[in-house]
Amino acid sequence: MISKHHKAIFIHIEKTAGTSIEKKLGLFEDLQRGVQDHSKLRYYEHIASLSYSLRNLKYVQYALRRGKFSKALLYLSNMIIPELTKKEYKSYYKFTFVRNTWSRIYSFYYNVMNDETLKRNYNISEDCSLFEFVKNKINPGDFSQLEYIRDNSGNCPLNFIGRFENLDADFKKVCQSLNIQNSNLPRLLITPDKAHYTEFYDHKTKDLVRQLFKAEIDFFNFKFGGS
């Protein structure tokens, strides 16, 4: 999400307390399905680029030629009042929160299995195991936390990467950087702590996750059973 008020860009990775952070930063008033912003860093880099402005100019010209004046005005407004300028992209405080891979995947699995709409969207049966879910329903390239924070050059130019496992203390650091006085977060979409995530893994599933997400596990130095 982009916060013009706080001059910040928050990269919301699923199942890392991002909904609570977006609420705190004022993205939405009422929590409803689909209000979260899961845009990746490359998206913000793209909309702040010159090529994006030039593309809108081409769309303006195309819409005018076809007599679609309302669309031409929309594209023109995107040029005049861009969602994010190149200067803002460079200067805004960019941050995210990451989570232990095994913990995050189990939380996502739990969320899907307890949401009838998501189960239909993923075409999942009532008896789908965690192993089957990881193997057949998760695309590592898209779900990887690294993919959220890499720019088009493959770098991770964020000012801060917090840890879900150290949420309160790390978000307090964010608030200090953004001059937010109260760092208390609302508690939204929390997975019940029925047991530690390790209790839901067997060796086969644990090794599958390690294989599929080796890059992020190594990058963030995640350990099974730890943070």
Image (cartoon, rainbow, N blue to C red):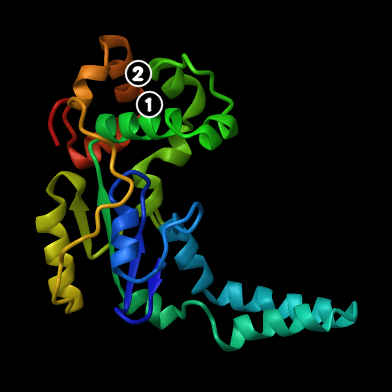
Secondary structure found at label 1? helix
Residue beneath label 2, please?
208
x, y percent for residue 98: 26, 47
Q: Quadrant of residue 205?
A: top left
In the displayed structure, does residue 48 sit left or right of residue 102? Answer: right
> Is 223 left or right of 94, judged from the image as shown?
left
Q: Quadrant of the C terminus?
A: top left
Q: CA distance from mark 2 to mark 1?
A: 6 Å
> Where 31 sits versus 107, above or below?
below
**What amino acid type should be assigned to the residue bearing mark 2?**
Leu
Out of 54 and 179, give the one closest to the viewer. Answer: 179
Screen quadrant of the N terminus: bottom left
Image point (21%, 27%), residue name: 194
Q: Is residue 152 visible?
A: no
> Where does label 1 land, which residue?
212
Looking at the image, can residue 77 be seen? Answer: yes
Q: Quadrant of residue 29?
A: bottom left
What residue is at 33 percent from the left and 82 percent from the top? 5
Please give the name of the residue rendered at 48% of the width and 59% of the height, measured from the top-left corner.
35
Q: Position of residue 177 (x, y in %)?
A: 16, 74
Where residue 31 sits in the image (x, y, percent)? 42, 58
